[in-house]
Image: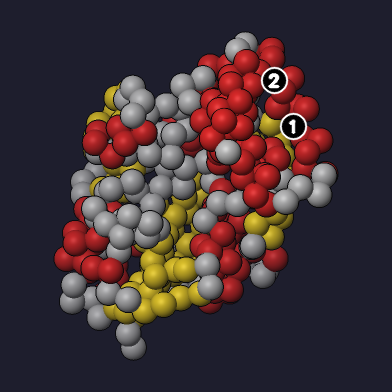
């Protein structure tokens, strides 16, 4: 099996040798989306391509619009071949944090406003916007924060592609002050871009540093005036504790639900920041929610739902 994998990676590296060959190869892959391939074969192909493409971002063309299926419905996204580990090229599904998409599909009807902190290229923003529109709600009550200029550009493109231009996009990081901060990116549109250099460097790639605008989380309520039922989604690549430590006043006033990325390295800080809120913590698993203390987070933990106990 190892030899077959090595052959596959080598073949992909040859295909990714130049921009022209990478573009042609990615286009040819689109035909695979219509073949009845087993999930295991899709995973092997996508993983081999992802491994071969590491450090080769420069050979890939600009993002192109593609329709993908998620548990929350079909969405149109501007995707590049390496996005989401090549899975959308081989299959017609996104295969990304499906348990969170499923939860949003089940619960989004409860809210009249959403604040997404760390929207990246807008995968969840777009899905939530389409669900809001389907439910007859005002999509301008969705506010998406994203500090990286490149990701923010694609976020706006994805929203426009789905007719969701009314969603409010704020090119800034939510933090503990209004102003600016150093921001670290492993590569353009990298999913580990962060206000923390160590977190951004976890992909073992060169890390670039820029300066981004910041918004104090203590004033986050001003972005959803008059909201009665709010969902806050936070995926800030290691900065969750700092953000949550500034949300106390907003939480006391609005009692929002929160979806927060919780990893083993961040669990203690997140638990400390939310102590005394009177919230219950549920790990979001593929089969549903399980109530567990945040201290149970491990390397594979991703997202948790925090909701008022009463």
Dot 2 or dot 1, earlier in sequence: 2
Q: Residue at x 70, y 65 (%)?
A: 134
Q: Relative to the observer, which residue lies in front, 223 or 195?
A: 195
| Label 1 SS | helix
| Nearest to viewer (mark 2 / mark 1) | 1
| 55 relative to 275 in the view: left or right | right
Across and down, in percent, residue 255 comes to 34, 76
Q: Is residue 157 visible?
A: no
Q: Crowding at label 1, few (<14), some or many (≥20) Cα neighbours within 10 Å?
A: some
Task: List x then y, in percent, for residue 207.
Answer: 32, 25
Q: Quadrant of residue 283?
A: bottom left
* Front residue of this view, candidates 74 and 125: 74
Q: Picture quarter containing residue 137?
A: bottom right
Report the disc number at residue 9.
none
State whether residue 179 is above or below residue 140: above
Tell me the residue at 69%/20% (across/down).
23
Which type of secondary structure does the marked residue at label 2 adopt?
helix
Image quarter where the C terminus lies is bottom left
Q: CA distance from mark 2 to mark 1?
A: 10 Å
Residue marked by disc 2: 23
The residue nearer to you, when weighing 102 against 108, is 102
Name which residue lies at 25% across and 33% down.
197
- Disc marking residue 29: 1
């Amino acid at each position: 099996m190892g030899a077959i994998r090595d052959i596959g990676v080598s073949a992909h590296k040859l295909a990714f040798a130049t921009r022209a060959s990478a573009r042609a190869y990615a286009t040819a892959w689109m035909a695979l989306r219509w073949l009845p391939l087993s999930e295991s074969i899709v995973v092997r192909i996508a993983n081999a391509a992802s491994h071969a493409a590491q450090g080769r971002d420069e050979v890939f063309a600009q993002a192109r619009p593609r329709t993908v299926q998620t548990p929350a419905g079909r969405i149109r996204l501007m995707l590049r071949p390496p996005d989401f580990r090549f899975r959308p090229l081989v299959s017609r599904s996104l295969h990304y944090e499906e348990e969170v998409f499923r939860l949003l599909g089940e619960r989004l009807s409860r809210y009249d406003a959403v604040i997404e902190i760390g929207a990246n290229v807008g995968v969840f923003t777009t899905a939530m916007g389409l669900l809001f529109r389907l439910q007859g709600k005002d999509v301008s009550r969705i506010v998406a924060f994203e500090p990286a200029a490149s990701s923010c550009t694609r976020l706006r493109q994805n929203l426009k592609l789905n007719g969701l231009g009314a969603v409010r996009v704020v090119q800034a990081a939510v933090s503990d002050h209004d102003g600016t901060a150093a921001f670290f990116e492993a590569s353009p549109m990298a999913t580990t871009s962060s206000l923390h250099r160590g977190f951004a460097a976890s992909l073992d790639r060169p890390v670039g540093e820029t300066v981004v605008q910041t918004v104090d989380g203590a004033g986050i309520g001003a972005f959803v005036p008059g909201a009665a039922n709010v969902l806050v989604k936070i995926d800030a690549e290691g900065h969750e504790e700092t953000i949550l430590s500034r949300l106390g006043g907003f939480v006391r006033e609005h009692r929002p639900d929160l979806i927060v990325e919780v990893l083993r390295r961040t669990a203690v800080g997140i638990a400390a920041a939310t102590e005394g809120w009177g919230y219950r913590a549920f790990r979001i698993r593929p089969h549903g929610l399980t109530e567990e203390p945040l201290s149970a987070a491990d390397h594979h933990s991703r997202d948790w739902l925090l909701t008022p106990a009463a």
